[in-house]
Amino acid sequence: MASDLSVILPRVLIVSRRSVRKNKFVDFVGEYHLDLIVSYGAVPVIVPRVSGVHMLLDSFEPIHGVLLCEGEDIDPSLYQDETTNLSPAELEEIRRMHASDTATDKEKDSIELRLAKLCLERNIPYLGICRGSQILNVACGGTLYQDIEKEVSSKYQEYQRVKHIDYDNYDAHRHVVEVVENSPLQDWFKDSLDKDKMEIFVNSYHHQGVKRLAQRFVPMAFAPDGLIEGFYDPDAYNPEEGKFIMGLQFHPERMRRSDTDEFDYPGCPKAYQEFVKAVIAYQKKLNSVTSVTKPIKLNQEMEKKRKVIIRSFSLARNLYSNGKEMHPSKHSELEAGAEFLESNTALSLQQETRLKQMGATVRNGGSYIEKLKFNEEREILARNVMGKMSAGQLSDLSSFYRMMGQICSEMLERKLSGIVNDTAAS
């Protein structure tokens, strides 16, 4: 019997790049990226570059990995905490030379920065290729060169300069990089490296690059002009345990021999292979945390108590919904729910979750109404404050509370599981 693989395989989010074709917008993702993700056992989920998507990323859950790889220059205002030395004339010349890349896309920036920060907050595996590596560095407080030729190459003699982009030789262009010892790159390309010369030739297509590397990262490769060509977080790298935070400025997926799909080096697809390995491990870890403990079977007495508590929470829900005083004769029925919340035992995680969804209860309707009014006043105040916040601030605030909620849920599950186990043992 065929199984539904879409339910089983982990999901990797990839943001599309927008271009104009026949006077219409077209969103796309390079096929090499998609092919490699699928071949190693994950499902690529394309996030379209559409206005407002950065506020809808919750709809793409669960997220088991993020691959960012294509796009225009990142808006300089997002990373320039230091004044650029480029003159207006030089900036205009850069815009003319790299017209297809210098037209910044703020909506794409918002989507990708939000995803990068989400990965950093939750330790979701992240692989950044080219622009994706720059996004990762900026998300962590690093900066970029606005133009390598103007800010880096100009310091070298002509024969020492590195050509990082060739518009006429997109796939075939190569330049040498030196791989750092004891890095993942050395492990991936170990069969192609000489002990005395830790060099490989890479494909690159970029006119910007890392200027100041964010503090949490360690370089993995350098171009002869000193530009960082790869970096990673050593504290967040262990694919077997679902950890992978890395940026590569070059394109291993495009390092293939002319007119074939054969890679330049056996290590070229390793970035994707190890990334997907981490994605699969992360999915398993996430599933084990969020899995629900099987409910214990209840005897008749416990079932009767359960129904009394359900009744109590049902009354509390109605009280909350209607916002009205309840008849004094009903107050005693709220006691069971209040006692349940104050006790140190729980029927099961599923039932406890269900009771939480039905709403909290209190010992008397009058105090509840007062608390309800107080909460309404706090809600109005919160709405006024948040109404003055920017979309980015609101997004970060939402992410913070989502993270706190996830931690709270994990701790609650562990405590409740312990309670259930203790009850069963006794």
Image (spheres, rainbow, N blue to C red):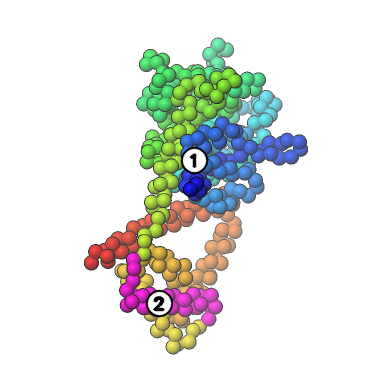
Residue type, mark 2 in image: Lys
Report helix, strand or loop for mark 2. helix
Q: Which of 121/3 is in front? A: 3
Tell whether 198 sits left or right of 262.
left
Q: For the stretch drawn in magenta, what is the main secondary structure?
A: helix
Task: Examine the structure image and report whether residue 290 is included in the region drawn in magenta.
Answer: no
> Tag 2 or tag 1, which sits nearer the N-term?
1
Q: Is residue 10 above or below residue 185?
A: below
Task: Examine the structure image and report whether residue 303 is included in the region drawn in magenta.
Answer: yes
Residue 280 can be seen, yes or no: yes
Q: Which residue is mark 1?
A: 42
Tell whether 99 sits left or right of 418.
right
Q: Residue at x 23, y 67 (%)?
A: 426
- Pinpoint residue 290: horizontal percent, then vertical percent: 41, 54
Q: Residue at x 36, y 78 (%)?
A: 304
Residue segment shown in magenta: 296-324
Check disc 2: other Cα within 10 Å, few if <14, some if 14-19, many if 20+.
few
Residue at the limit of the structure toward the top, as seen here: 159
Q: Residue at x 56, y 67 (%)?
A: 380
Residue at the limit of the structure toward the right, as seen here: 23
